[in-house]
Amino acid sequence: MAGNVLVVYYSTYGHTWKMAQSVEEGAKSVDGTEVRLRRIPELEEARKALSAQDFYVQVQEQMKDIPEVTHDDLRWADGIAWGIPTRYGNMPAQVKQFIDTTGALWQNGELEDKATGIFTSTATIHGGQESTILTSLVPLLHLGMIIVGTPYGQNPQIMTTEGIGGSPYGPGTLAGGDGSRQPVEDELTTARNLGSRLARVGARLKDMRQTAEHGQQDDAHQYEGQ
């Protein structure tokens, strides 16, 4: 059974956006998978504060045609990949604000038993590669989602002493102190692998949910007939 994968991200200077495109590519590599790429909108306060930076303005202009994420996108998806760059080892306010709007979905259990994973971008190898993903898992667990990482067995490229992003918790890239470094192939490979794994796991979980729902319906019909 094929499933739906949502790749939703926030990006200031384009690094997380580039990783998101590789996650999207990986998800599309699984036969029958439908994929949506969506962005989390910028906060007006941040836009004003960064408006004097030409590179920031350029990247935001390049992303303007990518649709903003909605709750219906979350409902549609069987697997959700979140692109979350770091802010002091945690998620940015832009991402937190969006997640904080999902109270109705949480109350109705609409995201429960769906697959999810996180990819990130940091300035340096010690700038939150692991802590950003680990701390961002907390609200996703509250929403009842099932965590999908990027294990070593499927991602030998992260078993390295070189300065690249990524971990078993999820893909990552390094932007450098001035933002000039772009994702390298090993980092993009890990991102693609997250996308394909989310597609596979999300489809299997969808099948399990539908089987359980049919079983409940059959039990209800049997009870009614007694």
Image (cartoon, rainbow, N blue to C red):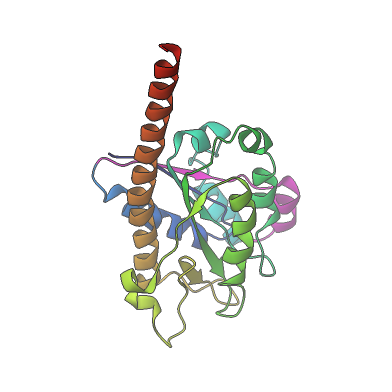
Q: Would residue 42 be found to the left or right of residue 17 on screen?
A: right
Extreme left residue here? 31
Q: Position of residue 98 (x, y in %)?
A: 65, 44
Question: Which one is nearer the viewer's eye here, 213 or 159?
Answer: 213
* Residue at figure coordinates x 59%, y 58% from the top left: 137
Q: Is residue 14 above or below residue 124?
A: above
Q: Is residue 147 above or below residue 220?
A: below
Q: Position of residue 4 (x, y in %)?
A: 38, 39
Q: Quadrant of the C terminus?
A: top left
- Number of numbered discs visible in the structure rendering: 0
**Can you tell which quarter of the image residue 18 is in?**
bottom left
Extreme front residue here? 226
Does residue 33 show up magenta in the picture?
Answer: yes
Q: Is residue 54 above or below residue 219?
A: below
Part of the protein shown in magenta? 32-53
Q: Position of residue 121 (x, y in %)?
A: 54, 66
**Can you tell which quarter of the image residue 209 is in?**
top left
* Residue at figure coordinates x 33%, y 54% from the top left: 196
Q: Quadrant of the N terminus?
A: top left
Extreme top residue here? 225
**Can you tell which quarter of the image residue 211 is in?**
top left
Q: Position of residue 162 (x, y in %)?
A: 43, 86
Does residue 50 show up magenta in the picture?
Answer: yes
